[in-house]
Amino acid sequence: MQSWYKELRQICLLTLGFQCCNCVSAAERKTLVANTLEYPPYEYTNDHGHASGLAIEIIDEVFKQIDNYNIRYEFYPWKRAVLHTQRGEADILFNAGVSDARKLWGNYANSVLINQTYVLFKRQDSNIAFKPDFSGFHQYSIAIKRGYLYGTGPFRQALDTGKFGAISISSSTQQSVKKLLHRRVDLFVGDYTPTMYAIRRAKLESVIDIVQDDTGNAVVLTWPTYLLFSKQTVPIELVQQVTQVLDEMKQSGRYQQIVERYTQGISMPQDAAPH
């Protein structure tokens, strides 16, 4: 009887020990706050109130391979998301373009998260044609997104040197679409995949078109975006680990599987360079 009691007591102690270990392990896991703007199908809040989308699934897949970290997603207007990460109030800014200013306070994972392809959108009844040097665009007004960089190439230069008649700042794709349809602007620039996603959901394919040249070229710029980690809160070793895991996902084909699932049915415009 005593032997049986001792065995039972040992089993109980072992079980309690395992439970305690699990509690400690859970307590040691650090939650990283990853923030960005709502930008379906890349990232958005689904009908159940959870973060979802192409970028969300890629990031979740990355951190499944890395021990001791949980991710909590928060959505803000883009400029506010940038400031949160710059101040160390958030740990990760994602879908972030590279700039020297951001490198002062953040470390980029050295593997592209999403390549964005930007085109110009117009009303279907407009005869505006695309010109790579944007000559003659001084008669057109354009809507651009607040806080976006738009690279350093011809389009950015056209914005900076006054080649457009007027520039209107929008906080969202939906706002740019409304400005276009209400004839407050002649054009707006948008990342092709999420903009077409929004246009199709609103059933506006018959009234909004892409600006192209005579050969069908429509691409204004291609823009790689990354995971950007706050230097105040995230060790560089973790950034390097994320880079490695993301590269491995691309080599294994897992990354492309996720991308294709979210972009199915959205064909890329002509001359969109593969990345």
Image (cartoon, rainbow, N blue to C red):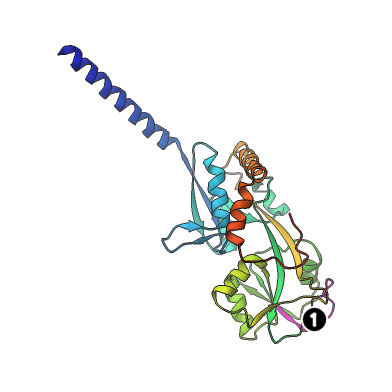
**Residue labelled with disc 1:** 138
Q: In which quarter of the image is residue 159?
A: bottom right
Count of labels in the image: 1
Q: Quadrant of residue 137?
A: bottom right
Question: Helix, strand, or loop for circle 1?
Answer: helix
Res. 156 visible in picture: yes
Mark 1 neighbour class, 10 Å CA radius: few under 14, some 14 to 19, many 20 or more: few
Residue lying furthest front = 265
157 vs 58, left or right, is: right
Along the line of sight, the residue nearer the viewer: 198 or 264: 264
Is residue 262 found inside the magenta-colored segment of the image? no
Is residue 138 found inside the magenta-colored segment of the image? yes
Q: Position of residue 254 (x, y in %)?
A: 61, 47
Residue 247, placed above or below residue 36: above
Q: Which residue is drawn at 72% across and 68% down?
A: 269
Residue 81, placed above or below residue 33: below
Q: Where is residue 226 in the image (x, y as percent from the top left)?
A: 65, 52
Instruction: Specify start and end residues of the magenta stretch as a single range.
Output: 128-142
Residue 96, placed above or below residue 198: above
47 vs 197, left or right, is: left
Q: Position of residue 113 (x, y in %)?
A: 64, 52
Q: In which quarter of the image is residue 215?
A: bottom right
Question: Quick one: quadrant of the N terminus?
Answer: top left
Secondary structure character of the magenta stretch overall: loop
Q: Position of residue 212 (x, y in %)?
A: 77, 75
Question: Quick one: quadrant of the C terminus?
Answer: bottom right
Q: Which residue is drawn at 61% across and 44% down?
A: 231
Residue flagged by tag 1: what amino acid is it?
His
Res. 228 visible in picture: no
